[in-house]
Amino acid sequence: METLYKRLFAGIYDPFTSSFEKEIYKYRKEILADVKGRVLEVGAGTGINFQFYNKNVQLIALEPSPFMRKRAELKIPEGLNVEFLTYKVNDEKLEDIIKEGTLDFIVSTLVLCSIDDPGKSLHKFYRWLKDDGKLIVLEHIHSEKPMNKKIQNVVNPVWKKLADGCNLNRNTDILIKENGFEVVKEHYFKSTLRFHSGIYKKSQKE
């Protein structure tokens, strides 16, 4: 049953998100414009970010769903080399593959909302990045309006089951800064939900 759900979710993901993806296209493009070197994309999904990468990046795409990965493979631009890993980000097996201080960039777009323990993931990001490495994030976050916040809190348990673990009510922007990162560039905007995008560096206070 879970396999069928994963297959169906992968099949409807692009059509379901197409409307707000048009609105956030420019934000994806902007934050990925200067990504270079050895790059880990966490939760590559159906590969929507692949179009924005410089062809010279060494891209590791983390995507545990074989159905998402199959669709992502179809979106790889000519000349872009992508190494797929099938693990979830908090899988301990990744520690043998990604060593401390070896990544120039980590990209996480619309992923931290669905990770079981985002704080643990952010701690890993901090360790995996080089001292001058950057974390790139684009995420929907909890509404600022009291009524909308209440609605999101009420709807969240059902939404989470339907949307493959996605949470509507996380304050990911705050969580990033609580786990060793400081802002290089950050932007808040509204589409269907409240969003934030940002580029972060490792805090030297850590």
Image (cartoon, helix red, strand yellow):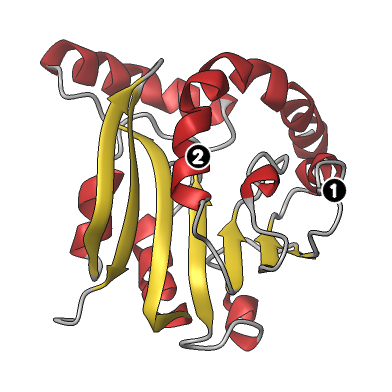
How would you rate the neighbour count of disc 2 (Cα within 10 Å): few for under 14, some for 14-19, many for 20 or more? some
> On the rendered structure, is 144 left or right of 113?
left
Q: Which mark is residue 28?
A: 2
Q: Are marks 2 and 1 in contact (CB under 8 Å)?
A: no
Q: Where does the N terminus fall, quadrant-wise? A: top right
What percent of the width, then of the height, locates residue 130?
A: 43, 83
Q: Secondary structure at mark 1?
A: helix
**Residue at figure coordinates x 25%, y 59% from the top left:** 184
**Residue at figure coordinates x 27%, y 57% from the top left:** 176
Q: CA distance from mark 2 to mark 1?
A: 19 Å
**Closer to us: 193 or 134:** 134
Q: Is residue 156 above or below residue 28?
A: above
Q: Secondary structure at mark 2?
A: helix
What percent of the width, then of the height, locates residue 41?
A: 59, 59
In the image, what residue type sits under mark 2? Arg
Q: Is residue 16 above or below residue 140?
A: above
> On the rendered structure, is 64 left or right of 177?
right
Tell me, yes or no, if residue 115 can be seen here: no
**Can you identify the residue that label 1 sits on?**
73
Q: Quadrant of residue 152?
A: top left
**Closer to us: 130 or 110:** 130
In the image, what residue type sits under mark 1? Glu
Q: Where does the C terminus fall, quadrant-wise? A: bottom left
> On the rendered structure, is 3 left or right of 206?
right
Q: Is residue 177 above or below residue 33?
A: below
